[in-house]
Image: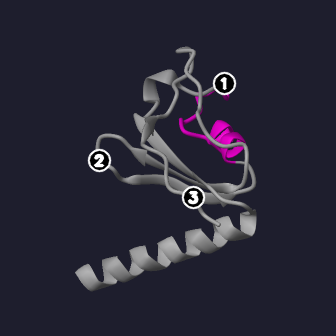
Amino acid sequence: MISTWSEWKRYPRPGRSENIEAPISPGLYEVRYAGTGALHSFEAVDNVAQALALLQVAPRSWFGRPDPAKLPDLEYRTCATSSKADAKAAAERMIGRRDTYLNGAA
């Protein structure tokens, strides 16, 4: 079973004491660039909160740390499911609809 998508939320930036608000369960997440709406990442995962926390959003500096000057302005939304299999099935349906839309619009 799939629930509904959350509202878009700003992706936390390091040093601002912001938190990721996401389910600690299987589901989907989508991350996009706030300014353009272009897709950054989309995935079906076992633990949505953990996957978002581990997401690499910034290029690394020469010393291997994220470069705060190059952090993109991102926003994310989540969708909880009852199992990872449900999350994968929902992701495949969404990708299929997106492909159909883009092929029809071209």
Q: Mark 2 packing: few (<14 Cα in 10 Å), some, or many (20+)?
A: few
Label 2: state its secondary structure.
loop
- Depicted 73 relative to depicted 39: above or below: above
Q: Amino acid at mark 3?
A: Ser
Instruction: Please report contact status of discs 3 and 2: CB closer than 8 Å, yes or no.
Output: no
Lower position in the chain sequence, tag 3 or tag 2: 3
Label 3: state its secondary structure.
loop
Q: How many marks?
A: 3
Of the two numbered discs 3 and 2 in the rendering, the one whose residue sits closer to the viewer: 3
Residue at mark 1 to residue at mark 3: CA–CA distance: 41 Å
Disc 2: which residue: 36
Q: Which residues are magenta?
A: 48-64
Lower position in the chain sequence, tag 1 or tag 3: 3
Residue closer to the observer: 87 or 53? 87
The quadrant in which the C terminus is found is bottom left
Residue at mark 3 to residue at mark 2: CA–CA distance: 26 Å
Say how the picture is coloured: one colour
Residue at mark 1 to residue at mark 2: CA–CA distance: 30 Å
19 left or right of 7 in image: right
Residue 54, position as x, y percentages in the image: 68, 39
73 left or right of 11 in image: left
Q: Amino acid at mark 2?
A: Thr
Q: Is residue 61 magenta?
A: yes
Disc 1: which residue: 63
- Depicted 43 relative to depicted 73: above or below: below
Disc 3: which residue: 3
The quadrant in which the N terminus is found is bottom right
Residue 97, position as x, y percentages in the image: 42, 77
Of the two numbered discs 1 and 2 in the rendering, the one whose residue sits closer to the viewer: 2
Label 1: state its secondary structure.
loop
